[in-house]
Image (cartoon, rainbow, N blue to C red):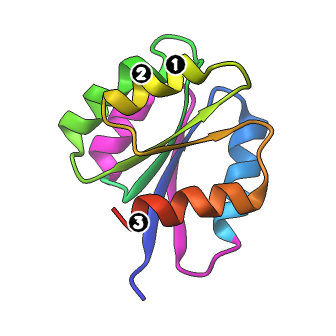
Amino acid sequence: MKEITFVIVDDAVFMRTIIRKMIEQVEEYKVLGEASNGQDAIEAAEKFQPDIMTLDITMPELDGIQAVPEIMKVSPKTRIIMVSAMGQQSMVIEAIKMGAKDFVIKPFEKSRVYQAVKNVLAM
């Protein structure tokens, strides 16, 4: 099976660490980079061209929703999974309209993260 590449974007180091640990438990999954805001996410998408990007909604400088269309411009094949807190459903819907493919809600369960990855890979 081909290696699936990821970039993880969240302003909280500890959330990036949790997601990284989940992803790296799957042999074919490889994390190429991380970013802590939307602007860095766009640069990481352009640099790494990952298969999948997990993208937090609420971040400094440029939030996840504003970053989605810019990420799609620099890395059109990247599938974006939004990461949101409870109560951000309207923001998730907005992000999906802009090109995100799925979402997970914090605090997340490993099974839901894996399901989101499977969902976007099947697209």
Residue 36 in magenta stretch: yes
Tell me the distance, in whole angstroms, between the alpha carbons under discs 3 and 2.
21 Å
Q: Position of residue 85 (x, y in %)?
A: 71, 26
The total number of labels drawn is: 3
Q: Are marks 1 and 2 in contact (CB under 8 Å)?
A: yes
Q: Residues within 10 Å of mark 1 (few under 14, many from 20)?
A: some
Question: Hey, which quadrant is residue 72 in on the image?
Answer: top left
4 sits to left or right of 105? left
Numbered range of the magenta stretch: 25-48
Which SS class for mark 2?
Answer: helix
Q: Residue 96 location, x and y as percent?
A: 40, 33
Residue 44 in the magenta stretch? The answer is yes
Question: Which of the two labelled residues, at mark 3 and mark 1, occupies the earlier sequence position?
Answer: 1
Residue type (three-letter) at the residue carrying disc 3: Leu
Task: Residue 4 in the image: state x and y as whole percent.
Answer: 44, 70
* Residue where numbered disc 1 is placed: 91
Which class describes the residues within 10 Å of circle 3: few (<14), some (14-19), or many (20+)?
few
For the point 44% across and 64% down, the residue is 5
**Image quarter in which the C terminus is found:** bottom left
Circle 1 sits in a helix, a strand or a loop, which is it? helix
User: Quadrant where the N terminus lies?
Assistant: bottom left
Q: Amino acid at mark 1?
A: Met
Q: Is residue 90 left or right of residue 80?
A: right
Which circle, 3 or 2, is nearer the viewer? 2
C-alpha distance separating marks 1 and 2:
5 Å
Q: Is residue 105 left or right of residue 31?
A: right
| Residue at image coords 24%, 53% | 77
Task: Give the residue pinned by disc 3.
Answer: 121
Residue 94 marker: 2
